[in-house]
Image: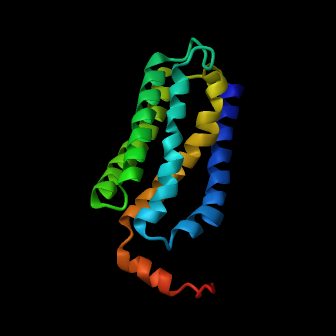
């Protein structure tokens, strides 16, 4: 039970650390940008979700890793990465915003599904092997940035204008 507890403590600390980084540095840098410009860094980050394919590579993960979890997580992540890249290439057009919505809903649901599949399959932390860093470091950041993307997508243009008007003028 101790390894599982340490696994969950690692995930909890990662949420706290990434939450602090996001609140202090990421959100302040994105909140006054136009929607498409604010989404770009989030989409670029999520283009790295191809790393979920590591769950399918023998030697990186234990041969005892539940295959239902591994397949679901890997293919869900590669679809999310593809949608992120498609949205990135399509912004700032309306089609790009639509794809950004599709990406964000799919990607967030995929992360929730991965946690469900892990619990349902009885995943043990040691079965992740070298891929241990994905749920303990990367997934909390992905969850948080999905929240940011929803906030950006739901932000009204006039709210942005008010925030931009309250910024001090920058000198060239």
Say which quarter of the image contains residue 51: top right
Say which quarter of the image contains residue 150: bottom left
Would residue 109 be visible to someone looking at this image?
no
Q: Is residue 120 left or right of residue 103?
A: right
Residue at the limit of the structure toward the front, as seen here = 172
Would residue 152 be visible to someone looking at this image?
yes
Say which quarter of the image contains residue 3: top right
Q: Is residue 128 above or below residue 49?
A: above
**Label total for image:** 0
Q: Where is residue 125? Give x, y as percent.
A: 63, 25
User: Which quadrant of the figure contains the C terminus?
Assistant: bottom right
Residue at 52 percent across and 31 percent down: it is: 52
Q: Where is residue 64? Give x, y as percent.
A: 56, 12
Q: Is residue 20 left or right of residue 92?
A: right
Residue at 28 percent across and 55 percent down: it is: 95
- Indicate the colouring scheme: rainbow
Q: Where is residue 35? Give x, y as percent.
A: 41, 66
User: Which quadrant of the figure contains the N terminus?
Assistant: top right
């Amino acid at each position: 039970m101790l390894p599982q507890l340490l696994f969950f403590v690692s995930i909890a600390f990662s949420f706290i650390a990434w939450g602090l980084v996001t609140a202090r540095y990421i959100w302040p840098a994105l909140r006054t940008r136009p929607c498409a410009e604010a989404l770009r860094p989030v989409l670029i980050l999520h283009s790295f979700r191809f790393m979920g394919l590591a769950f399918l590579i023998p030697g990186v993960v234990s041969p005892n890793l539940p295959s239902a979890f591994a397949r679901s997580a890997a293919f869900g992540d590669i679809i999310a990465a593809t949608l992120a890249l498609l949205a990135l290439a399509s912004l700032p057009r309306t089609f790009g915003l639509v794809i950004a919505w599709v990406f964000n809903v799919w990607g967030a649901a995929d992360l929730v599904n991965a946690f469900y599949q892990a619990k349902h399959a009885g995943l043990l932390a040691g079965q992740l092997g070298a891929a241990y860093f994905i749920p303990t470091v990367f997934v909390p950041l992905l969850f948080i940035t999905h929240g940011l993307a929803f906030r950006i997508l739901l932000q009204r243009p006039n709210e942005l204008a008010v925030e931009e008007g309250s910024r001090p003028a920058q000198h060239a």
